[in-house]
């Protein structure tokens, strides 16, 4: 569903440590980094309409992050687990350990983190284990 997302963080270097780790755990490549932005994933085009793209930009600290939340698709439950472990090791904070969330549906397997800027970040796998 997500085509692309752009977010701002007050410390780009701190965000790079976190997003490099969690994106790698999900198998999402970094496609660009310079002093102005971090870029992950692949841009959509006519031949590839299902791709997704994340841009992380430097910006001023914002207010409470309670309303900010994004969720990344994970290819399997092991990737959700890896996302959570990698995020914790890279400066994120636990906001919900990997596990089933049956109130969404029977196979909703997700983990939640807070990135270093306080944003709520999730990874989910919707499929039953193989």
Image (cartoon, helix red, strand yellow):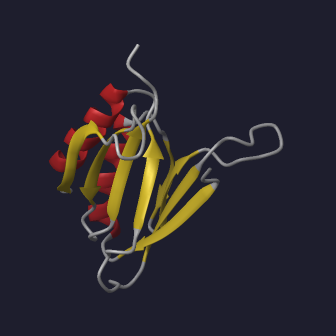
Q: How many marks?
A: 0
Horizontal placement of 70 versus 118: left or right? Answer: right
Q: Is residue 9 visible?
A: yes
Residue at the farthest top position: 130
Residue at image position (74%, 43%) is 49
The spot of residue 65 in percent (x, y) is 32, 76
Q: Quadrant of residue 47?
A: top right
* Front-lying residue, 125 or 91: 125
Residue at image position (32%, 86%) is 63
* Front-lying residue, 33 or 57: 57
- When the figure is inspected, residue 56 is found, relative to residue 127, above or below; the finding is below
The spot of residue 92 in percent (x, y) is 21, 56
The spot of residue 57 in percent (x, y) is 46, 70
Residue at the farthest right position: 46
Residue at image position (46%, 34%) is 126
Q: Quadrant of residue 76?
A: top left
- When the figure is inspected, residue 49 is found, relative to residue 13, above or below; the finding is above
Quadrant position of the C terminus in the picture: top left
The spot of residue 15 in percent (x, y) is 32, 62
Q: Is residue 90 visible?
A: no
Residue at image position (68%, 41%) is 50
């Amino acid at each position: 569903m997500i085509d692309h997302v752009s977010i701002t963080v007050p410390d780009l270097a701190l965000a790079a440590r976190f997003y490099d780790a969690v994106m790698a755990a999900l198998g999402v490549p970094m496609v660009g980094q310079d002093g102005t932005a971090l870029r992950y994933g692949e841009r959509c085009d006519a031949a590839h309409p299902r791709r997704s793209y994340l841009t992380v930009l430097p910006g001023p600290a914002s207010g409470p992050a309670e309303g900010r939340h994004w969720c990344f698709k994970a290819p399997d439950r092991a990737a959700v687990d890896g996302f959570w472990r990698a995020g914790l090791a890279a400066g994120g904070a636990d906001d919900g350990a990997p596990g089933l969330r049956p109130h969404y549906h029977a196979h909703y397997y997700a983990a939640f983190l807070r990135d270093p800027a306080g944003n709520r970040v999730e990874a989910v796998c919707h499929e039953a284990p193989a």
